Amino acid sequence: MTRPRPDGPDVLVVGAGPTGLALALQAAAHGARVEVVDSRDGTPRPSRALVLHPRTLELLAPLGATERLLAAGTTRVDAVLHARGRDVRVDLGDLPLPDTAHPWLLLLSQAAVEATLLGLLDERGVTVQWDTEVGDVGAGDVVGGDVRAGDVGAGDDGLQGRTVVRGRDGAVLGAARFVVGCDGAASRVRASAGIGFPGRDYRHPVVIADVDVAQPSGLSGAHVFAARDGIAFLFPLGEQAPWRLVVAGPAAGRPAGPRAGRATARTGPRAPHPPWPEPPSARELADLVRSMTDGAVTLGDVAWAELVPLRHHLARAYRRGSVLLAGDAVHVHSPAGAQGMNTGLQDACALGWRLALASTSPPGVSRLLDGYEQERRPVARLGIAWTSLAWWGESSADPVARVLRRVVVPAAAPTVAQHLDAVAPGVRVVTGLALSHRRPGFPLALRGPGPRAGSVHVGDRLPDLVLPPVPAEPPGTAEPLDGERASAPHRLYQLLDRTGHHLLLLGERAAAPPLPDAAPGLPEHWVHRVRLPAAHGGDDLARRLGTTCPAWCLVRPDQYVAAVGGG
């Protein structure tokens, strides 16, 4: 972006990590004009995240990303827990999650996720402008090709004029109706908007490295070693060597003096934490792994190592006027549970369609955008709480944590591995499948005909049901509607494979409600009408929604139930 134009983008995304790229992709897929900038030069960086959750894969499917991600990663991976001579194997490729088409954890590097999203953006004509460092963000008006800057959020509802982005030298880089900071924990966008970022450091950092394993030979799958002084993970996902090693605990952060040929500690230019000790040398790392694995693993070459300080923070606001935040720019926490990349991607899928819709200036724009924080802040707060507790159990030197890590978990693991159904509710929470937004004023939702007795309510994620075959001659007749599907999908989400809202007509005689009544402010072209015959899952879904056929159900782009009627 050289000189801003009055017809500049609707959405300017600052930061081209997974969150920023997914946000740009979803906003563009819903019709917004999008631009993306990043201070990096475009060279892939070493990945810190390695896992995608089932809910994340569901959200990315309508954008065309999930099939490509599945092709690039692996789902059939056994994880082996090693502790005090016990080896417990758990199949991560077959979790008891019947209401999703992705009952697994997908192992895939962050770099591969970014490459996939970049490819999809390129197909939509959206390219990242690299080497573009943001210095300041403020609101202003585009007048005759010139930008007049003001305060962030100025104007009625904070949405008048355009938000101006300037470089470190003060030069105008561009102007957009909305600017979204996806620029990480040291976010310049967040700082410019004056949004606080309270939090604290965890006591111990984590060591990440790409390594060869000399012994045992033929090692495969993922491995977790619960040690007295912390925990070590080995994943077959190294980028510069076959294995990715992650070590957490007191031993990971021990002080180290100057050494020749040592790895380099990486710290951001605005990192909100004090300096940490340097990463261990290759020899020290080999000694550390030998100790953490009780001698079971001997490292070969160490291709790369990084010492990562850990902290947890939560921004005081997700939005200030026309400036919004997502991903690590608004929340950071420990890597326990592989939440970082997944939470950021889920933020993106909660916000992208909102920004595209807000760009059309429907009634209730502020309420629509405020709903983003109202829905996502509780998720971040809960995530910080439970990941902090989990990280304490994994890495703390506290005697109670050591007993849990070394005694209780290994003793319980064999039983858990044989009865995964018992832990399925916890898995659903960790992966986001259990997330619900039930509350008054749910965006794009009707009040409805009153309380319903079903298990799925307005604000809940629509379950991805397995659908029975369509009968050869379905009972009843109905005139075809624009957007109705004639095919017979195997699962419900196959009906929701396009961007936009979906109006599910349940039963052969279900009629579509007037759109202004079902979803005030929602453009007609945003809604895909799909009929679900009673015998092809319509009755089942209606029952779960607490009604009967004929009925209808409006589903948001992020697969949450927005409104229910009929019955």
Image: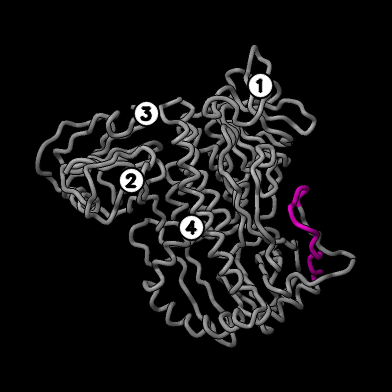
* Earlier-in-chain disc, 3 versus 1: 1
Q: Earlier in the sequence, mark 1 or mark 2?
A: 1
Residue receiving disc 2: 561
Q: CA distance from mark 2 to mark 3?
A: 17 Å
Q: Is 281 contained in the magenta span?
A: yes
Tell me the quarter of the picture where residue 236 sits.
Answer: bottom right
Magenta span covers which residues?
Answer: 268-282
Q: Nearer the viewer, mark 3 or mark 1?
A: 3
Asked whether the residues under the numbered discs 2 and 3 touch, taking CB atoms below 8 Å apart as contact, a structural biologist would say no
Q: Residue at x 48, y 57 (%)?
A: 53
Q: Nearer the viewer, mark 2 or mark 4?
A: 2
Q: Nearer the viewer, mark 3 or mark 4?
A: 3
Secondary-structure class at tag 3: loop
Q: Residue at x 64, y 57 (%)?
A: 48
Marks 4 and 1, how far apart at CA: 39 Å
Name the image quarter holding the N terminus. Answer: top right
CB-based contact (under 8 Å), mark 4 and mark 1: no
Percent across and percent down for residue 564 are 26, 43
